[in-house]
Image (cartoon, rainbow, N blue to C red):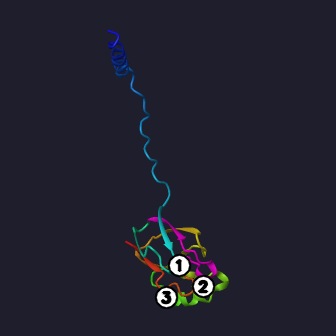
């Protein structure tokens, strides 16, 4: 009977554990609905490329576009920005004027009416965002206005339907 005692004690412990109250767990908390505009992140790199070159939006949709300069070269040599232009803007003429606009971080004052929004000029590992809302359908070009970046392909299109 002495050899059965440890077995009986273990059985009793298991039986009592099965009879104890189950642990109370909190009900899962529903995720709060996202407030504010949808966020679109775009990376610019030392190869003068955006990782996102096409964005589709609905008329009236508000978005926050965040530009991240993921490069490592200094701002003076490889700064990046993102400039959203109105449909029909001559992007080649804009980029040409931008190259000469050193005093305004390559945002040409002569094209102020063509610019919907723009980020600041970013150095390596910096980010900036803009909030935009498009009230009319169309194709809205976006470019980096740092000299030669547009010509090297640092551009994209926001299509609004």
Q: Earlier in the sequence, mark 3 or mark 1?
A: 1
Residue at 63%, 86% in the rendered image: 101
Res 106 visible: no
Mark 3: secondary structure? loop
> Reading the chain from its start, which is encountered first: label 2 or label 1?
1
**Residue 23 coordinates in the image, percent (x, y):** 42, 28
Magenta highlight range: 61-82
| Pointer 3 local density, CA inside 10 Å: few below 14, some 14–19, many at least 20 | some
| SS of the residue under disc 1 | loop
Whether pointer 2 and pointer 1 mark residues with C-beta atoms closer than 8 Å, the reply is: no
Q: Residue at x 54, y 79 (%)?
A: 115
Cα separation, mark 2 vs mark 3, equals 16 Å
**Contact (CB < 8 A) between labels 2 and 3?**
no
Q: Please provide percent x and percent y for residue 79.
A: 59, 78
Q: Is residue 31 left or right of residue 126?
A: left
**Residue with the mark numbered 3:** 151
Query: The N terminus lies in which quarter of the figure?
Result: top left
Residue 108, which numbered label? 2
Q: Earlier in the sequence, mark 2 or mark 3?
A: 2
The location of residue 10, given as percent across then percent down, is 36, 19
C-alpha distance separating marks 2 and 1: 23 Å
Mark 3–mark 1 Cα distance, whole angstroms, equals 14 Å
Question: Which residue is disc 1 drawn over?
Answer: 46
């Amino acid at each position: 009977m002495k050899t059965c005692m440890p077995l009986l004690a273990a059985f009793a412990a298991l039986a009592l554990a099965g009879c104890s109250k189950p642990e109370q767990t909190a009900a899962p908390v529903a995720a709060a609905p996202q407030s504010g505009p949808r966020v679109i992140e775009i990376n610019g790199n030392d190869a003068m490329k955006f990782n996102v070159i096409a964005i589709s939006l609905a008329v009236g949709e508000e978005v926050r576009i965040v530009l991240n300069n993921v490069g490592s070269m200094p701002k003076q040599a490889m700064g990046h920005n993102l400039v959203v232009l109105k449909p029909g803007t001559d992007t080649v003429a804009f980029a040409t004027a931008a190259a000469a606009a050193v005093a305004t971080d390559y945002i040409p004052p002569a094209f102020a009416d063509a610019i919907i929004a723009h980020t600041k000029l970013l150095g390596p590992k910096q980010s900036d965002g803009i909030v935009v809302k498009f009230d009319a359908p169309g194709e809205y070009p976006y470019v980096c206005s740092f000299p030669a970046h547009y010509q090297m392909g640092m551009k994209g299109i926001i299509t609004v339907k």
